[in-house]
Image: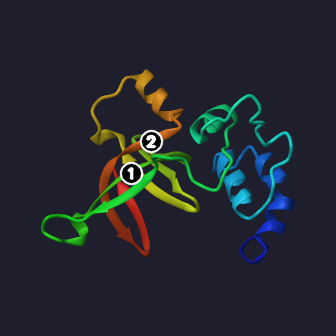
Amino acid sequence: YEKAHRPAQFWKKHLEIVLGDSNSVYRPWVYKREAMAAGVLLAEEEQPSLKGGELGPEEQFMRWGVWLGPAFLPGCFFQISSSLSGEPEEATACFRGVWAAGRRYRKNLFFITLGVDNNKFVDLVCDLSRLPQLSKEELEAAATAVFLWGEGRLQRSNGNVMVLC
């Protein structure tokens, strides 16, 4: 209730607790950006110092794990392309976003959530068995990636939208 109706008070009270939770599903930048969007100023140790020149949002994010300013990271997007036949089940989506959460489900299936804009997230269902064979190094690099981009088939189920890739 408090998060929905009094977000600034919620985040002032809970940001430190949420960031300290090692079992959290989401990466820390998600909570920090939600708090900033609610009007909460980050604590001094959490707010990057921009002395010595302006850094762009991506450089701030890569250095400090968060970026200042109201805009989302440049270059992130989510676009739906309808099929040539116009059938909704054949729609595809192109995306580029920031890794917000992810977990493995079964041997070759991953659920990934990407941030693509302020308060906008996209759920991906990635089946590794459909991808070309990747080396262990390539898989490890993908698992630690900050940005993820690609395309997939759009699926709507029970009011949820996800991308199968």
Mark 2 lies on a secondary structure that is: strand
- Residue at coordinates 44% horizontally, 42% vertically from top-left? 148
Q: Which of 106 and 116 is in front in this view?
A: 116
**Residue 107 figure quarter:** top left
Q: How many discs mark residues in the rendered view? A: 2
Which residue is identified by label 1? 95
In this view, 16 is above or below 160: above
Quadrant for the N terminus, please. Answer: bottom right
- Residue drawn at x 25%, y 64% is 91
Relative to 122, say whether 3 is above or below.
below
Amino acid identity at mark 1? Phe
Q: Camera-side residue: 3 or 72?
A: 72
The residue pinned by badge 2 equals: 148
In the foreground, 93 or 68: 68
Q: Which amino acid does label 2 sit on?
A: Leu
Left or right: residue 95 compared with residue 112: left
Where residue 19 appears, as percent x and y from the top left, is: 77, 48
Residue under the point 44% across and 21% down: 137
Residue furthest to the front: 53
Task: Give the camera-side residue of 108 and 158.
Answer: 158
Estimate the x, y position of residue 164 in percent, counting from the top left: 34, 54
**Mark 2 residue crowding within 10 angstroms, few (<14) / some (14–19) / many (20+):** some
Compared with residue 95, is residue 2 higher up or lower down, i.e. above or below?
below
Are the residues tagged 1 and 2 within 8 Å (C-beta)? yes
Q: Secondary structure beneath disc 1? A: strand
Mark 1 and mark 2: span between their CA atoms? 8 Å
Q: Which residue lies furthest to the left in this view?
A: 85
Mark closest to the chain's N terminus, 1 or 2: 1
Q: Any mark on residue 156, and which? A: none
**x and y percentages locating residue 154 in the rendered image:** 32, 61
Q: In this view, does 82 lie to the left or right of 72?
A: left
Q: Where is residue 51 in the image (x, y as percent from the top left)?
A: 77, 32
